[in-house]
Structures are given as structure tokens and as C-alpha cells.
Image (cartoon, helix red, strand yellow):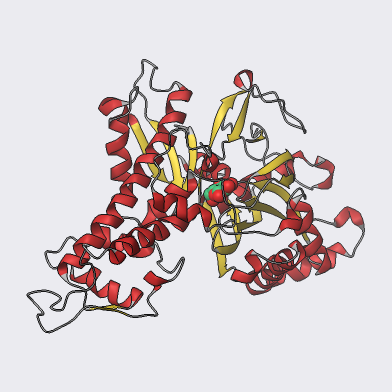
Amino acid sequence: MTLLTIHMSSSARWGLYLAVDLGGTNFRVCSVQLNGDTTFNLTFNKVAIPKELMVAKTARELFSFLADQIEEFLRAHHEEHFVETKKQMTGPSSARDPFRLGFTFSFPVNQVGINKGKLIRWTKGFDIPDAIGEDVCGLLQEAIDRLGLPVKVAALVNDTVGTLMARAYTSTEGSQPILGAIFGTGTNGAYLEKLSKIRKPLDGTYDKSTGEMVINTEWGSFDNQLNVLPTTRWDAALDESTVNRGVQKFEKRVSGMFLGEIVRLATLDMMKDESVSLFRDANSSFNDWKSTTNVSPQSGLLKPWGLDSSIMSVAAADNTPELSTLRQELESALDIFAPSLEDAQSFKAVANAVGRRAARLSAVAIAAIVLQSGKLDGPDKEVVDIGVDGSLVEHYPFFRDMIYEALKAIDGIGPEGAERIRIGIAKDGSGVGAALIALVAAKMESETDFEYKAKAETSWFE
Ligand code: BGC
């Protein structure tokens, strides 16, 4: 559990901020213009993180790559401002005002200050041992300084905290979200808790005046002992093949990075079973009786991690009687030629079971926070708002519907409670959230550093 206080009750310095996001398959660099009126303008660039950098020998290699991307982005989108700021940086120190950058770093961190946090462990396929225990803002700042960029890493943010912030900022109805959650490559949630309820000793600097604190739960590592989580032999096999064996067990049943591999392992077992005739029809269906099903030796189905979870979305979305889209996808994405209707039906059933289990477990995590917040007990029947982001909630058909279906069945929530819970996408949450926290950081710096006067008032989270 990592902790961070957010307090934005007084003057804020609206304007242009940089935000970078490391935490999944892509690295995103964005600039966010915060207008201070619930709106923002965002420009971004996204680049896939080379696989070898996810397991680089040294942290320096990964962070140098990140700094290169920041430089490229500034040159491409803010050339004038970049050159001007760079000039300023070599001038008298009173005139220095670098770009402030919010760093969304979506891994478990022991956060001890607004721009300071030590990496506890890597997740989601990253494994660079010499970064463990290091301050990740320091690592990024060093890489930025090596390039001489006029950028200050001003804030460290988890993507769930960013999502919570972004949802609060963009809310036009005055209702504040109680949870920011990610269901993407990984999964996690952050919520607001009363300081009086927090028993964990808190080190580092934080502001006590609001009486509340944002808690990053890191629920991806819930129940690593497997006391209550459902477990199949494919879950166990998957865990064995990961770089972070034994941890993130909840995440490995819920998030996009892992679902495809569970489907692959289960499907492969069915194929190996002589009594099951999956993907081996001589006449692949009575509609195209001449074709014989054939699984190429190159098929991703036969290679560890060779089945991308995105095919599960195709399976869920295809409700045609012939499942023709799914059959085409099995062919183009997995080199399974001429699959029969029955093959596609079986694949769809396995994929849907894995997807539905993920959605139901997601509902359990959401329900835990809703119940903890006590918001359903109030007399005024207000909406309980939740901001979410990530590829699963965005692109997996019916994921949110399945979450609602499960919420209705949970004690303490029920159909009435589920009706009051509003799960809404916080688009670009991590970018906007990081920019917002960079703004908080700018405000926390000595005000004499800036030539600005208090312009806006806001009072989120109070
Ligand atoms: C990380 C979290 C992150 C989540 C979603 C997990 O693997 O531990 O910090 O919020 O993924 O990106």
C-alpha cells in the first residue's frame, strides 16, 4: 500500500504541463493544457516499449530511452517553448522555469514525497533488478539531465491515482468519484480514506489538513496465498511462466496481459485431449464441407504467450450464427486454418468464461471499496461515482455489463446498490491526473519561484 495526500484547496497554477506514463506495453508522453474549468487540451505521442528494455540489464537503459522520447516529443510539439525554456535555463537562476512533468509510474512504489518514491517490485512483465529500491523520479531526472532537457520531474503518480484525479477534475455535476481503477494490462484501484482509519505507520511528508489521504491499494497482489481466489491448473501454469512468480495473483486472473495466456493454456489442453475433437475436423463444417481444419506449427496457440487477449474481444462481440468474424480471426491471428463452427463455439465458450471470471473478480474489488466508503448507507441515495480506464473496460465487449451483473449479486450492494453505482471511463486519466499532480507540486514549491498570482479556486477532495 502506498500513500499520498492530495490537497488542492487554494490557488492553482493552471497552464501547460508534461505527463509521461510508464506502466504497460506503451510509453506515452503528453502535454496537457489545464484550463482550470474542468476542461483540458491534450497532445500525446505513444511508443511501444521494446521488449528487451522491459527486462534490461540496467535501469539506466530503460530511463535513457524514456528521456529520449521526452526530447523527441518536445521538439515535435513544443519546439518554440522548448528552445526558449532551454535558453532560460542557462540564464540567471531567478528566470528559470522548466517544464514541470508528472510521472505516471504504474508499479508498486513506496511513495515518500510528491516526487519521490522507491520501487517495491516490478509487475506486468518488467524485470530490471537494479531499479528495485531506487527512487524512480530520481532515475528519470538523471536521464533527463544527461540530455540537458529543461524538464523537472515534479510529481510521481500511480495510474489509478491519476484516474481518480482526472475523473474528479472532469466531473461537471459536483459529485466526486470514490475510486479510480484500472482494468488494462494490469489492474489496481485508488480511493480516498480518512486518516483516522489508516493504521499503517506513515513515513514521508504529507499534508494532514484535509483529514484524508488517497490510498493506492495495489489490489493486483490481493490474496497471493490463494485463500479465496478461484484457481485452475491453467492459473498455476501461467504463474509459473511469469517473471514475477508467486505475486500479483489477483492481477493474473483479471488483467489483459494474462487473460489470453489462460485461454491459450486451456485451449491447448483441450486440443491435446484425444477425446475432444477441437481444431481437427476433416470436414470443418457442413457449410464448407471441403475444408480440413489445420493448425499451423507456427500458430501462436502453440507458443507461450502467443495468444493476444484482443481475440477474446472478437469472440465476445461475434454473435452471428456462423461466428464468421471469429473464425476469420482464428485464421488471421492464430494461423488456425478453416476452423469449424463448433471449433469457434468452443473457443468462444472458453474465452468468455475467462473474461467473465475476470469481470466478476473486478466487481469484487470495486464492491469492497464501495462498501468501505459507506456511501450506500447514506439516506440521500446519491450516485456513487467510479472512474475507470484501461483496455479491458474500454474494448472488451460487455465487460462493464458483467461487472454490474456481479455487483447485483454481492451482499451489501444488491440490485438497488448496483443501480446507484456509476462506472464511467476517465479517458486519458493517467495523463491528466499526472498533470494535475504536477500542478499541485508547482504550487507547493516556493511561490517566489513563480511570477503568478492566485487565479483559480478549487476544492476537490474536501
Ligand atoms: C501495478 C499497479 C498499476 C496497475 C495498473 C499493476 O501491475 O502494480 O501499480 O496501477 O498495474 O496499471
In the picture as drawn, the residue positioned furthest to the right comes out as 92
Task: Point out the image quarter for the N terminus.
Answer: top right
| Residue lying at 60% horizontally and 61% vertically, measured from the top left | 30
In the picture as drawn, the residue positioned furthest to the front comes out as 274
In the picture as drawn, the residue positioned furthest to the top comes out as 379
Task: Name the one closer to the observer, 15 or 156.
Answer: 156
Left or right: residue 356 compared with residue 218: left
Rendered location of residue 187, percent (x, y): 49, 47
Left or right: residue 219 compared with residue 259: right
Task: Name the one closer to the observer, 344 or 325.
Answer: 344
Up/down of 236 relative to 84, above or below: above
In the picture as drawn, the residue positioned furthest to the bottom comes out as 290
Rendered location of residue 122, percent (x, y): 64, 52
| Residue 35 can be seen, yes or no | no
Up/down of 278 relative to 419, above or below: below
Up/down of 81 relative to 429, above or below: below
Task: Point out the image quarter for the C terminus.
Answer: top right
| Residue lying at 57% horizontally and 59% vertically, measured from the top left | 125
Rendered location of residue 202, percent (x, y): 72, 28
| Residue lying at 34% horizontally and 45% vertically, measured from the top left | 357
Up/down of 186 relative to 110, above or below: below
Rendered location of residue 26, percent (x, y): 55, 64
| Residue 154 can be seen, yes or no | yes
Task: Name the one closer to the observer, 277 or 431.
Answer: 277
Left or right: residue 156 compared with residue 91: left
Numbered label tally: 0
| Residue lying at 53% horizontally and 45% vertically, measured from the top left | 166
